[in-house]
Image (cartoon, helix red, strand yellow):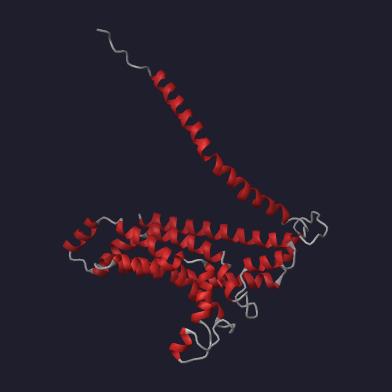
């Protein structure tokens, strides 16, 4: 019989290194197409747009030369830019709060329902699958028309929902909530189904009622999901464009014009691509600041809770 020789630590390390190197090489081959597309269609346009924000480039054929922070200085002194930024912040606040709360409430209802759960899931999540153009046309043609719209027909009024500066933003927010709440609902529902059932059973043995279970078990266990949903919702609301552009075009009287629509109008209507890039990167900086601040706030709350 021949004795079995145990491999030395050096031999094991060499084998592991070879395997790891092989996985790395093959992995790079698999992700190479995605990396190429990512670099060409995202990283390169991002860097090019940042460079353009420091120039006077004009798609109409004007002189293109470096002007430093001239575009940014003009943007910070532009009252229409500040108005569009304010509209964006208002939309973000008005839409984020109901989208988070309503998504949680709907998820709790469906989670505790014992019949036809598939129908409720489809009903709540279905609108999120519709394209923005379909949603906008649906609400423009069936819900908001003053003469024959569903709302005015039900209430017996003739309110011009999208034509009144004091109501237009609320109308767009209502459409957005109906359209996108299904995504938050689905995230909350998945998180609810992952909560261990024995926690509720132990609480029931201790005499806890439904409110005690919600306050002491459900909401704390959903803290991470809530943090994720809030950050995603803030970013999505700050980037609002489609439904506002299709439903109001930024009107009436610039009451709903978002900062992305303002940048779009400057770049593709006014042909000032450099200035539009500067406005876009102001929004980009705002999104980064809000996202980091929100994540830091939730991290602190989690540390305190633990």
Q: Nearer the viewer, residue 304 or 183?
A: 183
Give the residue displayed 49% in from the left and 85% down from the top: 149
Give the residue displayed 45% in from the left and 66% down from the top: 128
Where is residue 235 shown, x and y percent of the image? 53, 61
Give the residue displayed 49% in from the left and 80% down from the top: 142
**Residue 170 visible in the displayed image:** no
Where is residue 212 shown, x and y percent of the image? 26, 67
In this rendering, position of residue 273 left or right of residue 180: right
In this rendering, position of residue 113 left or right of residue 130: left
Would you identify the image quadrant in which residue 108 lies?
bottom left
Which quarter of the rendered picture does the N terminus lie within?
top left
In this rendering, position of residue 237 left or right of residue 119: right
Q: Does residue 42 lie above or below 136 as drawn?
A: above
Where is residue 227 shown, x and y percent of the image? 43, 59
Q: Residue furthest right?
A: 63
**Residue 284 visible in the displayed image:** yes
Give the residue displayed 46% in from the left and 62% down from the top: 230
Where is residue 220 shown, x and y percent of the image? 33, 60
Q: Residue furthest left?
A: 205
Q: Residue furthest bottom?
A: 156
Which quarter of the rendered picture does the C terminus lie within?
bottom left
Q: How many marks?
A: 0
Q: Nearer the viewer, residue 174 or 205?
A: 174
């Amino acid at each position: 019989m021949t004795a079995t020789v145990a491999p030395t630590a050096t031999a094991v390390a060499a084998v592991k290194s070879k395997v790891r190197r092989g996985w790395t090489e093959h992995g790079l081959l698999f992700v190479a197409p995605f990396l190429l597309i990512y670099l060409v269609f995202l990283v390169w346009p991002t860097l090019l747009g940042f460079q353009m924000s420091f120039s006077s480039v004009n798609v109409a054929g004007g002189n293109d030369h470096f002007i430093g922070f001239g575009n940014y200085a003009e943007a910070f002194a532009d009252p229409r830019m500040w108005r569009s930024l304010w509209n964006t912040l208002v939309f973000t606040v008005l839409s984020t709060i109901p989208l988070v709360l309503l998504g949680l409430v709907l998820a709790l209802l469906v989670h505790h329902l014992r019949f036809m759960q598939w129908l409720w899931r489809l009903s709540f999540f279905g609108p999120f699958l519709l394209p923005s153009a379909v949603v906008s046309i649906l609400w423009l043609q069936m819900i908001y028309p003053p003469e024959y719209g569903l709302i005015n027909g039900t209430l017996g009024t003739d309110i011009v929902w999208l034509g009144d500066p004091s109501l237009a933003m609320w109308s767009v927010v209502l459409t957005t909530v109906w359209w996108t709440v299904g995504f938050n609902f689905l995230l909350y529902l998945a998180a609810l189904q992952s909560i261990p059932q024995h926690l509720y059973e132990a609480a029931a043995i201790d005499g806890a009622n439904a409110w005690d279970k919600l306050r002491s078990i459900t909401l704390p266990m959903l803290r991470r999901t809530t943090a994720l949903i809030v950050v995603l919702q803030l970013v999505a609301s700050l980037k609002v464009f489609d439904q506002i552009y299709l439903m109001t075009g930024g009107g009436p009287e610039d009451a709903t014009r978002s900062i992305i629509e303002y940048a779009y109008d400057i770049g593709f209507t006014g042909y000032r691509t450099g200035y539009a890039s500067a406005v876009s990167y102001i929004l980009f900086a705002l999104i980064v600041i809000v996202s980091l601040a929100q994540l830091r706030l939730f991290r602190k709350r989690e540390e305190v809770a633990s």
